[in-house]
Image: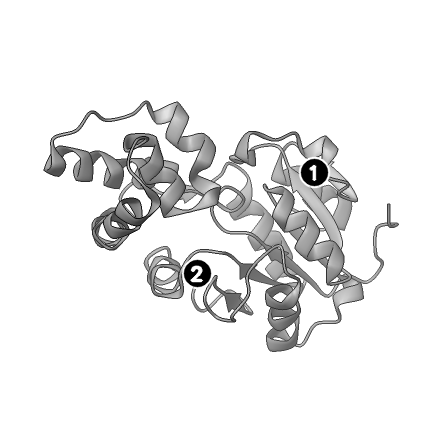
Amino acid sequence: MKSFPENIQGVLFDLDGTLLDSAPDLFAALKLQCEEMQVAVPAYEAVREVVSRGSRAILRCAFPDIDDHALAALVPRYLEIYQAVMADHTHPFDGVDELLLALESQGIAWGIVTNKPGFLTDDLVVRIDWARRAAAVVSGDTLPVKKPDPAPVLLACERAGLDPARCLFVGDDRRDVMAGAAAGLYTVAVRWGYLDGGDPQQWNADLVIDHPSELTRRLKVPA
């Protein structure tokens, strides 16, 4: 495990499950699609656990028996519905707003590296009024590869003018830890997110935290 970096320049975050609790709107979109197709709506808890894996995993909760080709055909409509509702109930997790404000007050840049498609990421970041605050936003289709590949993390550092060795990467999925570590950042796994059914303690992150305030204290910035 790495030592906590000194003179932190920036903190990069995963989006869904780390900064934002977006599961309610991801589920709402699935519910609407199920109603359109007159199929049973799966349990919210089952959907929430897989939202980090993307739209196909979410749809698979409602359509467990169709083949992959048929499932893929449902994705465009799901994303269309989701884009219409994606800011209705999505909100920052408890303590996130305070952490971001604390970073900004100390001149520490923050950015987003997500596997969410760019057209959704860009729209959502605007709707929650983060577009002018984030130093960099890299989405799942910005490059030909996505997390756990380190390239999107390195691109975010480049766009924000950050030295990876002086940055943190924070996420709620093993892929976040893998991408951040491979890019040379100090990695932080969070327990409050979706976790994809995993245990953050087993992901070899440099630090595991239960609440954003723990990171604020580690960074020694006022909340």
Please say which color scheme the image uses: one colour
Q: Position of residue 167 (x, y in %)?
A: 73, 61
Tell me the amino acid under the disc marked 1: Glu
Depth check: give the residue in front, 77 or 101.
77
Dot 2 surroundings within 10 Å: few (below 14), some, or many (20 or more)? few
Circle 1 sits on which residue? Answer: 214
- The N terminus sits in image quarter: top right
Q: Position of residue 187 (x, y in %)?
A: 73, 50
Q: Residue at x 40, y 24 (%)?
A: 45
Local SS, label 2: loop
Q: Position of residue 195 (x, y in %)?
A: 56, 35
Which image quarter: residue 206?
Answer: top right
Circle 2 sits on which residue? Answer: 130
- Residue 22 in sight here: no
Tell me the amino acid under the disc marked 2: Trp
Which image quarter: residue 174?
Answer: top right
Dot 1 surroundings within 10 Å: few (below 14), some, or many (20 or more)? some
Depth check: give the residue in front, 155 or 163.
155
- The C terminus sits in image quarter: top right
